[in-house]
Image (spheres, rainbow, N blue to C red):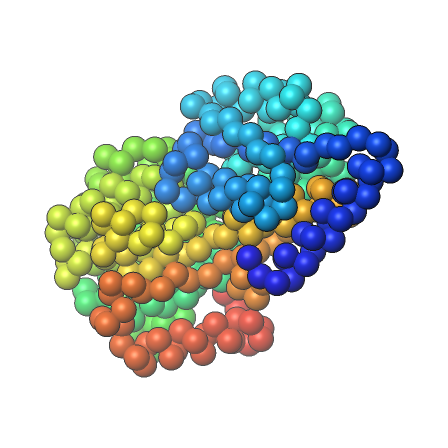
Amino acid sequence: MNTKIIKTALAAVATAALMAGASGSAHAFKACQVTDTGGVDDKGFNETAWKGVQDAVANLGVESRLLESSAETDYVPNINSFIEEECDLILTVGFLLGDATREAAETNPDQQFSIVDFAYEPALPNVLGQVYATDEAAFLAGYLAAGMSQSGIVGTFGGINIPPVTIFMDGFVRGVNYYNGQKGTNVVVLGWDVESREGLFTNNFDSLDDGRAFAQNLYEEGADIVMPVAGPVGLGSAALADELGTDQLKIIGVDADQHETDPEKGHVYLTSVLKRMDATVVQAIEAAMAGDFLRPVIVGTLENGGVGLAPFHDLDSEVPAGLKRELDTITQGILEGTISVTN
């Protein structure tokens, strides 16, 4: 956790302590997380958000509670359970919890909520959204994939055709296109068309068999680098790459650093497009502790460290020094606004 976050957190804790002392009662702030159907051990999305809660437990002294959703029908009961438990902040994780969170927030205006990967328009006064400019980091991943591909074909597929998924795919495709424009090449992306908004989707976030099958199909069409944007589904793609060998197929992970969260197959990951839900969850908890929901949304970007590109780890020696320098230059261009990831 960076120094700025720690200082902010300490200030929030001090304020809360003073308020508790003034009222004559001690109350440990309780942060309660509801996962989507991927579960808390999904090696990515929910697990990273939960890490943020646990960081707050360690650094801010809060209490934590967790309820996992096995199906979408669990969303409302899980949220209601935490309302009855009088959690100070209820954190819901994922776009698919958008409707359930809205309904609960409107019915319980005094309850503070924060939702990961979603924001409301117009904003709800008791809900802090957490969204991510993952297309910025995915743009870098696309450029990297284009520069590393030996076949001149790369691929991507998603879990469900929803904005938090397709924003990864948008950035990836546009990064490849930028590489082609800079190099005069014609690296092809299979699996997603930015203009038509059509592509490959497993329609779930849990089937490793689908992850293997979709990656297999892309590989058979010539792709030697694949970016699955489907939570644990991508673990099936990594298993295929492990069997084929990284000279045949490399994987780009998403959400967390998959080299670290999937260590048995860590060697197949060229990099991962990081969505640092842990950092924004800590910020949301800080804001709730301070009673400060003045801003309706937290946006994770390259600039504030909310998104990024993971190290190349085992494959570092295969990435040319010149390509690494180009990625640094592009990162600076994105930060300065001279390179657009949306065009």
Q: Is residue 301 visible?
A: no
Horizontal side of 282 relative to 178 (left or right) equals: right
- Residue 33 coordinates in the image, percent (x, y): 55, 33
Horizontal side of 185 relative to 80 (left or right) equals: left
The N terminus appears in which quarter of the rendering? bottom right
- Front residue (pair 55, 182): 55
Residue located at (40% from left, 70% from top): 178
- Residue 333 coordinates in the image, percent (x, y): 51, 76
Q: Is residue 205 visible?
A: yes
- Front residue (pair 165, 128): 128
- Front residue (pair 208, 276): 276
* Furthest residue in direction right, as rendered: 22
Residue 225: name its quadrant: bottom left
- Residue 274 coordinates in the image, percent (x, y): 44, 55
- Residue 197 coordinates in the image, percent (x, y): 44, 48
Whether 249 is drawn above or below 68: the answer is: below
Residue 58: name its quadrant: top right
Whether 93 is drawn above or below 73: the answer is: below
- Front residue (pair 238, 184): 238
Whether 194 is drawn above or below 142: the answer is: above
Whether 203 is drawn above or below 230: the answer is: above
